[in-house]
Structures are given as C-alpha cells and as structure tokens.
Image: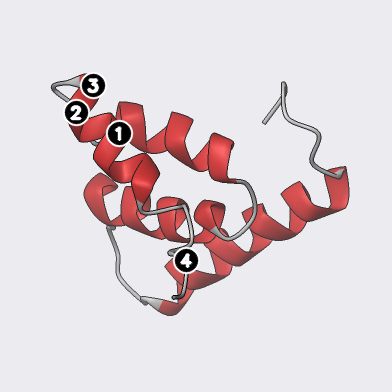
Amino acid sequence: MEKRAVDENIICNLIDDIEHTIVLLDKKTVPSILVGEIVSKKLRKIDDVAYLRFVSVYKSFSSAKSFASEAKKLVPKKTK
C-alpha cells in the first residue's frame, strides 16, 4: 500500500490479523488461494483501491467488465 495514504499502524495490524487468521487454521500447509481469499477479505475492509489492485492480480480479471463488476460491489447501493 505504498502509494495509498494508509496509516502504518493499520498496515501492521492488517498483517498481524492475516497472520493470526492463517495460524488459527492450524494446518501444516495453507494453499495460496486460501491466503489470497483471507488477504482480499481483510484488505477490502481497510482500503477499496488497494483491495481492487490486489484482486485484479489475484483473480486475474480477464476483462475490464469483470474488473468493473468487482468495483461495483464496493459502491454502497442507494436506498429509495
């Protein structure tokens, strides 16, 4: 999150939280896909843009449409 204005303490807490979640799985090996899911869920709560950057690589979006679809999930729906 080098280019994002996120407090260093928040980043450290995020890393600790991810590590703690993985340790709680109590597995000898953890598949990278599971690590990616954990990271994306926790990153989404902190910074939308950093989340989108991460999942764009992690999920290997095949088109701008799939990227836009993921971005739309971040925009709160207006209530009528």
In which quadrant of the rendered image does the C terminus lie? bottom left
- How far apart are the alpha carbons under marks 2 and 3? 4 Å
| Closer mark to the observer between disc 4 and disc 3 | 4
Q: Looking at the image, is 73 positioned above or below residue 24? A: above
| Closer mark to the observer between disc 1 and disc 4 | 4
Residue at which label 2 appears? 65
Question: Sequence-wise, which precedes: disc 1 or disc 4?
Answer: 1
Residue contact between numbered discs 2 and 3, judged by CB atoms under 8 Å: yes
Residue at which label 1 appears? 68
Task: Please state if 60 lies on the left or on the right of 7 as rendered.
Answer: left
Residue contact between numbered discs 1 and 2, judged by CB atoms under 8 Å: yes
Amino acid identity at mark 1: Ala
Mark 3, residues whose alpha carbon is within 10 Å: few (<14), some, or many (≥20)?
A: few
Q: Secondary structure at mark 1?
A: helix
Mark 4, residues whose alpha carbon is within 10 Å: few (<14), some, or many (≥20)?
A: few
Q: How is the image coloured?
A: secondary structure
Residue at which label 4 appears? 78
Amino acid identity at mark 2: Lys
Amino acid identity at mark 4: Lys
**Closer to the camera, 52 or 17?**
52
Q: Secondary structure at mark 4?
A: loop
Q: Looking at the image, is 57 positioned above or below residue 6? A: above
Q: Position of residue 58 (x, y in %)?
A: 30, 34
- How far apart are the alpha carbons under marks 1 and 3? 6 Å
Task: Please state if 20 lies on the left or on the right of 72 as rendered.
Answer: right
Residue at which label 3 appears? 64
Q: Position of residue 22 (x, y in %)?
A: 44, 66
Q: Position of residue 41 (x, y in %)?
A: 43, 60
